[in-house]
Image (cartoon, helix red, strand yellow):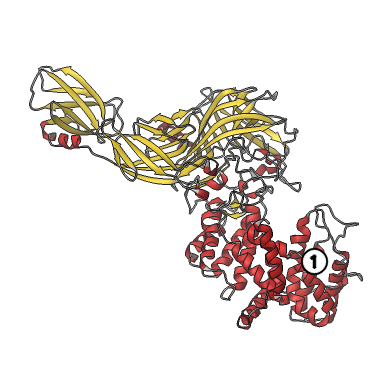
Amino acid sequence: MKPLHKLICSLIILFFIQGKISPQNQEDLNTIKTRLFNSVMSQAAYNLANQNVDGTFVNVTYPASYPTDFTGGPRPHLTEMYVIAVAYHTRGEQYKSPDLLEAYVKAWNWWHTTNPTDANWWYRSIGFPNSLISSYLLMADELKTHYPEAFTTATNYLLAEWTPQFYAEALVSPDGANTSDVTYYTFAASVTAKVDSIITQTAEVLTNLIEIQTTPKGEGIHPDYSFSAHTGTARQLYLGNYGKEYMGGIIRFMLMTDDTYLEVPPEKVTIFENLFLEGASWVAYRGIFDHHQHGRRVMPTDGYVKTLNCLNSLIQLNTPQKEKLQELSNWMSRSFEDSENNVQQGNRMYWRHDYMVHKGKNYFTSNRMSSTRVLCSESANGEGLSNYYTGSGINYIYITGQEYLEFWDDMNWRRLPGLTAPQKETTVTLPTVPPTSQRGLNGDSYAGGTTDGETGVTGFKYNKVHKTEVNVTATKGNFYFKDYFVVLGNSVKAGRNEGVPFTTTVNQVKFKDNFKIDNAGIETNLTVGQTLAPTTSDRAYLNNIGYQFIKNTNLNFEVKTIGSSNIAWLAFNHGNIPNNDTYAYAVYPNITEEEFNTKLNEKRFEVVSNTASNLCVIDTIDNIAQIAFILQGTLNLPKLVSSVTVNVPLMVQLKQQEDTIFMNVANPYCETRNIAQAYVTLGGLFEGDGADMDVENNKTQILIPMRTNEFQGSTVNVKLTKKITSGIKEINADLNALSVTPSLLNAGDILRVNQKNRTNDEYQYQIYQMDGSIVKQETRMRNSESSFNISTIGLNKGMYLIRMNGQSAKFILK
């Protein structure tokens, strides 16, 4: 017999023989029952003329037949019952009115006799009981005393889902949100009806739901504090929909059981706190959640508001991290006008869902990939019908938070920001993504990123194939720095001709009044009905975002009226059958046009590589190199360390601060490809954990133990310090024998060298970096003077030593 079947059989026996709650805990249960009553009580009056003789209501529309078709039929009937129950307990003329009690019983008897059903299982299992439980909590004692049969049928209706099999499966393989919904209303009903065995079981399940999912397809909270649901095929990001329902079930249970024998233990409380602090906080922005978080309900509903309500309820419990939770609540509760600047800034990689978010001072952006282990957003129940490309490296960019909601109904889902796709007419239906199909997966498992919490980089081998929609592959990378990000792509290749061009969309937003474009060197203002395609362009400015085109050819710009919206579109045109095409651009969010021009003149970054082997960008001001090694190999980095070599595909970020290198790396294949350890070799000599210096070849190999199990794909941090070799120390002893002027000069300027003690007519000089490596050397014949000039063209900013005939001097290039 399989282990699960053994457990189920054992639990079936326990289900029926389990004893009652011990007497010492009965007082706690009375407290919980009172809290349950108070949690749903309000104030109301009810006009009994609204009820028909048969118990139905005048203001409720009733279906002609059952089951209804995914509508939930007469669910408002249960809402009317709740209002009657509240009115029954409201002090005043109707307080404890026998007529109201009778009306409630009539309404319940109609429901019980009719037994409304729907084609969607959710209504009978969750929707209807959730609508009934509030009035039941208010009326159960009255029913038990005056209408015992109604009490029994209502109780049985609410406990019907709680079978021995459900209990067993909820312990072994819970599905997060749905399990919390069913278990909470069952818990509430069992406490009120005093069904002791079910009280114990439901409390156990709700407590166990607060755990970190370690299996590949676990539903609920993952080790990176992302939330997954509907994982039958693969993991699926879902905090804004099923996640908020899960939060609701858990927080209600915590509020009801606080300071009782059923209260949630401290280690579970910490996990739940971190779901807000490490999960929800990073995907929340100016009254919305990132659109990637809503699953099939791509149009945001009440996820943000419900999450905030749950957060505020958690704060009431005075948990250990209350201060941090309060700070988060204060930020999430701010008015739209006051929430422009992010309190929380930085970068976060959710490796369990191939997903990175980045928050600048006053903007928010996200990058969602997919793989053989992670789905894009699903389609189901008539929702999410345009979700096919939502896991294709989509890079939403938010300033106000309303950028995409402004034209949501007119969105072109083949033009999502960051997407490479064929530009078919919008009337051509996109493939749907059933949650149990393979269609939402990417064809390659390389999808990952690394971060140090401030900046980060993602790498993605895009592979999207559908028999009628698309056949395309590409290698993509997103590089997130402090106040801008760079997007690279190469090897864009179509497997067949779709009869339309393939494009990579830079962005798609609502056109307002200012779309400035560099059109082959001529500044052009684009307006409604205009298109430039293809054109050469170095930059564009639209809706307070600056776009710099590093590859500046074959660009499409368009402003077009679609439906009721004027929509602006920026994209790279790869042609009908692209073969190893590339794209490269930078984005400067929430910036004035003047600030944008200043940024361009700074030449802040350099694209070092954009190939099928590796993609790399260096921020030359902050000395940050970000690399997506698609393949093992070597990349030359003359402006930071002379080279980087990896023995496996790897995500790498290097930050240099004076003589220290902060390196973070991650496995882009996560659990799909186990990388137990990685070797990274840097040019130069460095000390640190795992560092092995090769002085003769001026290299250092660093052995890095990688994360294991469910943490595969998460970042490993390494700190390295430049090693000053003994040769440099010997040079320092001779510093007074040679002088240079000026000792502080701009890179590229002339350095004047003066030697005090000439020994021969031929001289050879060497210029060293502070890691001991030689960056320039030359042999010359001396003139009659004791000084000569050296050009510093080609040398980077930093401190150097010049040595000549055993004499040395220092100088600094700025």
Name the residue nearer the viewer: 564 or 696: 696
Q: Is residue 32 above or below residue 749?
A: below
Few, some or many residues within 10 Å of mark 1 (<14, 14–19, 20+)? many
Label 1 sits on residue: 78
Q: Could you tell me residue 349's position as x and y percent?
A: 51, 46
Horizontal arrangement in the rendering, residue 314 relative to residue 93 (left or right): left
Asked where in the image residue 31 lies, by quadrant, the reply is bottom right
Q: Quadrant of the C terminus?
A: top left
Q: Residue at x 55, y 70 (%)?
A: 317
Q: Could you tell me residue 326's position as x and y percent?
A: 51, 63
Q: Residue at x 76, y 76 (%)?
A: 140
Please state which amino acid type lies under the numbered disc 1: Leu
Horizontal arrangement in the rendering, residue 538 relative to residue 130 (left or right): left
Name the residue nearer the viewer: 21 or 177: 21
Q: Could you tell me residue 23's position as x and y percent?
A: 63, 83
Q: Residue at x 79, y 70 (%)?
A: 156
Q: Could you tell me residue 795's position as x and y percent?
A: 29, 28
Horizontal arrangement in the rendering, residue 142 relative to residue 204 (left or right): right
Asked where in the image residue 758 lies, by quadrant, the reply is top left
Q: Quadrant of the N terminus?
A: bottom right
